[in-house]
Amino acid sequence: MTKGGKMIQYGRQLIEQEDIESVVSVLQSDFLTQGPVIEKFENAVAEYCGAKHAIAANSATSSLHLAMMALEINRNDLIWTSAITFVATSNAALYCGATVDFIDIDKQTLNLDVSLLEKKLQQAEANSNLPTVLIVVHLAGAPADMLSISKLSERYNFKVVEDASHAVGSSFNSKMIGSCEYSLLSIFSFHPVKIITTAEGGIITTNDHSLNEKIRRLRTHGISRNDSFNDGREELWNYFQEDLGYNYRMTELSAALGLTQVSKIDRFVSRRNEISEQYKWELRTLPLEFQKFPENAKSSYHLFIIRLKLDQIKKTKKQIYFEYLENNINVNFHYIPVYRHPFYEKLGFKKNHCLEAERYFLDALSIPVHPGLTQDDIERVIGTTRTLVE
């Protein structure tokens, strides 16, 4: 039997009247896809992040795939990423035929451990097996150490792509994540549980003009209206497929929702930070650990992750998970180490490939954090957590 009031979700969208009106206006317009709102949305995201270009797509997964294709990743390439991320991060490289490997996480930041990355790069250089691309994940919205990673990329000549699916509204060294200050490409997700939503959707930001053009072409079947192919005619049907692309376009409806949501990023992120600070203060004496990040970074707090000191609590994570559910609090776990999934085991990965990721697997949970939470909701989460782990 469940206890407490309504189910408190770990994350959900916050849709307001202006969002609804924006979508309705598109439904009443001439264009439901490939219209003017997509460009407005892209420009709004680029301006917010301080990037030169933004290219919208129908998901963050397709955005990651487009990024890999634009960088011409193939079966001769090796792609590294964090062991703790959603499978889409590494899947995007596999779509292109590349080989993937994983970097263990730092116990405090939960992002890839830069010291272990450096050691792995040293070994890879000695074995002439350096990665082509490192996909950096900003887990839960907490920025990774992009400055150190950028320096390593220059030394070892690999490209940096940011999987910033969690990190709309985050910043590092006073630069917004998505500015591509330290990377070639950044990818955001607009799934309903993320900071803002387009229902389903994603976007790529970049400062590289040629990558921008290539990604736009790949997003639409590899087709462009390239005048260099024109035989002198100017008919509208003179379009040409230059590459093997996909239909990864975002709809006007999604872009309309995103356009109004962009103006709320700072408000939503501020509220997530307020809730997170309250959690850290109220739960500070419990046998828990919280994600940490440098003072020069600001997290969007897409997730609020707690790590259970199980030796003091004397319960398993599974027990605590179901006790939260019994109290109508929907906690979650982000994420299983990618290499532990059966598909990746078939590729040859074994348990304990990354030791800190294994420990994280045993003791981490995500508790509710989103701007739709009421103060009563927050106090219920705090009170229930105290009861379960004290």
Image: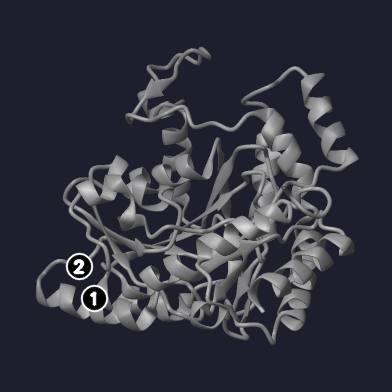
Q: Nearer the viewer, residue 320 or 192?
A: 320
Horizontally, residue 46 falls left or right of residue 372, namely left
> Residue at 66% of width from left, 37% of height from top?
199
Q: Is residue 221 above or below residue 104?
A: above
Image quadrant for the C terminus? bottom right
Residue 130's disc is 2
Count of number-bearing discs: 2
Residue 10 visible? The answer is no
Instruction: Judge left or right: residue 18 versus residue 123.
Output: right
Q: Position of residue 197 (x, y in %)?
A: 69, 44
Amino acid type, mark 1 = Leu
The residue located at (56%, 46%) in the rendering is: 203
Q: How is the image coloured?
A: one colour
- Where residue 384 sits: x, y (%)? 74, 67
Visible residue check, residue 260: yes
- The alpha-carbon separation of the residues under discs 2 and 1 comes to 7 Å
Badge 2 element: loop
Of 41 and 389, the residue lying toward us: 389
Which three-letter amino acid code belongs to the residue tagged 2?
Leu
Q: Nearer the viewer, residue 217 or 132?
A: 132
Mark 2–mark 1 CB contact (< 8 Å)? yes
Image position of 386 with respect to 331: above or below: below
**Which quadrant of the structure image shows residue 367?**
bottom right
Instruction: Give the SS element for disc 1.
Output: helix
Q: Which residue is mark 1?
A: 121
Residue 171 vertical placement versus 336 (above, below): below
Q: Earlier in the sequence, mark 2 or mark 1?
A: 1
Q: Which mark is residue 260?
A: none
Q: Is residue 83 left or right of residue 296?
A: left
User: Badge 1, how many Cα within 10 Å: few under 14, some, many 20+?
Assistant: many
